[in-house]
Image: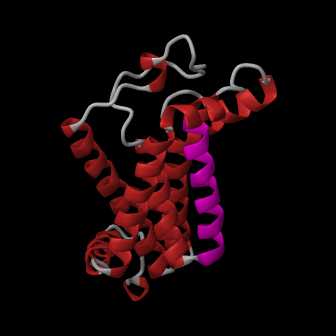
């Protein structure tokens, strides 16, 4: 079932140059794009003196790091070869080769973790980020790097970590934001009245 769905998504790859280029861009550029999103979010919070936005950006960074930590742990327990390795003649692989575990998807986990946090702090940008995260997950299957269950697991992990951080462990980003704000005050990058 997983391989059949992977074939349905990956099957057209390599025969539609414009769509292939777009999917390669999404699959390969997602990581730096989401890192840039967090950095810009923090910068806006700093420039506009919005403590909640600085805290949200820090929470997004923590959530993505936590999701990747869970992924590394799961991948060390169970190694799953990537689709293009198991089915080299059937899977169209459009990106450079990576031999680490296919399960779970790091890109999907980090993208959904950041998008979930953004959604908790800023609804509309969060909805956009969740749509982009879903597109990232789809693109990772399209380019032949993952099976659908790999990106689904990554999405569940990222969303779960993000939700837990916002709803159950919200004190952690608050404390870290407080320390970061204190450091910024000492470096004269932030006025004391603008702290969280």
Residue at position x 31%, y 70% from top?
A: 180
Residue at position x 51%, y 77% from top?
A: 121
Judge whether residue 128 is colored magenta.
yes
- Display coloring: secondary structure
The answer to whether residue 31 shows anywhere in this view is yes
**Name of the residue lying farthest toward the left:** 77
- Please state, as top left, top right, bottom left or bottom right, where the C terminus lies in the image: bottom left
Query: In this figure, what is the number of numbered marks?
Result: 0
Judge whether residue 1 is colored magenta.
no
* Residue 18 in the figure: left or right of residue 182: right
**Name of the residue lying farthest toward the top:** 89
Q: Which residues are magenta?
A: 123-141
Q: Position of residue 151 (x, y in %)?
A: 47, 45
Given residues 68 and 3, the one toward you in this image is: 3
Given residues 93 and 178, the one toward you in this image is: 93
Quarter of image, res 130: bottom right
**Name of the residue lying farthest toward the bottom:** 193
Quarter of image, res 82: top left
The answer to whether residue 58 shows anywhere in this view is no
Q: Position of residue 18 (x, y in %)?
A: 80, 28
Q: Main secondary structure of the magenta part?
A: helix
Above-or-below relation of 122 to 67? below
Above-or-below relation of 11 to 128? above
* Residue 133 in the figure: left or right of residue 13: left
């Amino acid at each position: 079932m997983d391989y059949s769905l992977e074939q349905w998504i990956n099957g057209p790859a390599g025969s539609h140059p414009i769509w292939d280029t777009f999917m390669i861009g999404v699959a390969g550029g997602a990581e730096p794009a989401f890192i840039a999103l967090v950095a810009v979010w923090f910068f806006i919070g700093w420039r506009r003196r919005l403590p909640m936005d600085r805290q949200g950006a820090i929470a997004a960074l923590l959530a993505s790091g936590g999701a990747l930590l869970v992924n590394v742990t799961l991948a060390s327990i169970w190694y799953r070869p990537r689709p293009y390795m198991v089915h080299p003649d059937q899977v169209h692989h459009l990106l450079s080769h990576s031999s680490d575990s296919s399960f779970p998807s790091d890109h999907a986990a980090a993208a959904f973790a950041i998008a979930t946090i953004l959604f908790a702090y800023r609804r509309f940008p969060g909805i956009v980020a969740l749509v982009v995260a879903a597109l990232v997950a789809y693109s990772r299957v399209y380019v032949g790097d993952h099976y659908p269950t790999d990106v689904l697991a990554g999405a569940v992990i990222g969303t779960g970590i993000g939700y837990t951080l916002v709803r159950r462990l919200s004190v952690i980003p608050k404390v870290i934001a407080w320390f970061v704000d204190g450091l910024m005050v000492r470096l004269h990058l932030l006025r004391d009245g603008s702290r969280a």
